[in-house]
Amino acid sequence: MTSRIAVVGLGALGCATLLALARKGYAVEGFEQYRVGNDIGASGGRTRQHRLIYGEGAAYTSLLQRASQLWQQLEQEQQTQLFWGGGFLTIGTPESAWFQAVENSAKQQDLPHERLSRAAINARFPRLNLDEDEEGLFDPAGGILLTHELLIASAQQAQQLGAEVHEHATVSEITANETGVDLRVNGEIRRFDRVIVTTGAWSKKLLPALPIASRRLGMSFHLGKESGFDSQAFPPTMRVTPGRAMWNTQPLPDGKNFKFFVGDAELNEQHDPQLVATEATDSLTPLLYQRIDQHVAEAVNGGHRTIVGGGTWPEAYTWDQAPLLGELATEPHVWIGIGLSGHGFKLAPALGELLAQAIAGEVDLARDWPLFSPARQFAEPQAVYSR
């Protein structure tokens, strides 16, 4: 391909897009303000959950299935493990809207799943605590993704296919016209035919008009007192009962310890991360620390409440919590993959492939994926975690 393309921001979607374009033979360069695989952006925190049964809507299922195929391909190419199976568990009250949405998604698309009573969960996954009126939906295709390893593997594979990766490369300005796009990188101007911006919560610095807001999530790492924290006995779990704390647990690959997140342990930053996200316990504010400490004891049996690691990571959100994917009408040749709204790691390989296919003229995003259109009408959101 003769077109020169730049990908700005090499987080989950940026690395996936870089790799997808390299697979198609484009002359593509990626720019990252830190290092690929860092713990600064939304990709920090060591792991992310994966689930195939998606209460967010059936439109996502084909993307999740394709993402799984692309992870498997990358594992084979780079000879490394990036995904740990064991399933995914959704906990809630049977009459709640979100619990029903997850179950309906499984039934409508004929996806393997199990409806589990509280007693069944207690017997099968004894490290998890449920209220008496809660039940579970088990997704056997779920598991955890290793975030830093995935980014590094994607970038390495892209480089092996001819892509260039520039680390410690800060893009401070994007200037588009009918013939191409200029990037100011570390003070110097670089010219490209197209630019794809995948800078997450930092996107307003480059594209101030984007209707996104950012927030920082607080996550913590804990030691297990006893056995039973491997992915088979302690699957990644999300509690969605309305009116109660939304929490999420994930086993760590060592099979002995776990990560914890609670939905109200967040900082609403609106336009820009006010602090550089970092995997450091002292980045948790006293309020975040208090909320995590309170809820981890309620959610997990056999784990130490002591926070042995943790941090805060920024994410960018849209009002309807669907990504912005496609070319900007107001900026010729500037494409975006922004506002992933918590979908990032689960969808990144498939969304990156979609962007590459759209660049190549193989997919019409506006027609085929209006759910993601940057031109859809909405007001700027509040950065609030809703599930």
Image (tube, rainbow, N blue to C red):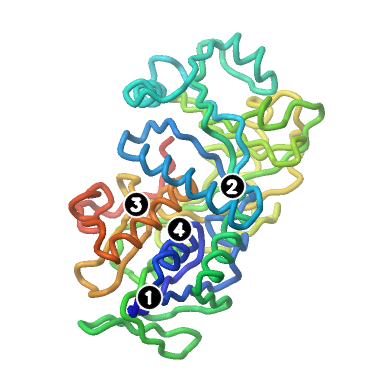
The residue that disc 1 covers is 5
How many numbered marks, from 0 up?
4
Q: Secondary structure at mark 1?
A: strand
Which residue matches tag 2?
A: 218
Q: Amino acid at mark 2?
A: Gly
Indicate the position of residue 382 as horizontal and vertical percent values: 36, 49
Which is more foreground, mark 2 or mark 1? 1
Along the polypeptide, which appears first: circle 2 or circle 1?
A: 1
User: Which percent across, then down, holds residue 194?
Assistant: 32, 75
Q: Secondary structure at mark 4?
A: helix
Of the two numbered discs 2 and 4 in the rendering, the one whose residue sits closer to the viewer: 4
Front-lying residue, 31 or 357: 357
Vertical placement of residue 107 versus 238, above or below:
above
Q: Residues within 10 Å of mark 2 (few under 14, many from 20)?
A: many
Which residue corresponds to the image point at 59% horizontal and 51% vertical from the top-left?
Answer: 75
Residue beneath disc 4? 13
Label 3 sits on residue: 323
- Marks 4 & 1, CB-CB < 8 Å contact: no
**Nearer mark to the viewer, of 4 and 1:** 1
Q: Are marks 1 and 3 in contact (CB under 8 Å)?
A: no
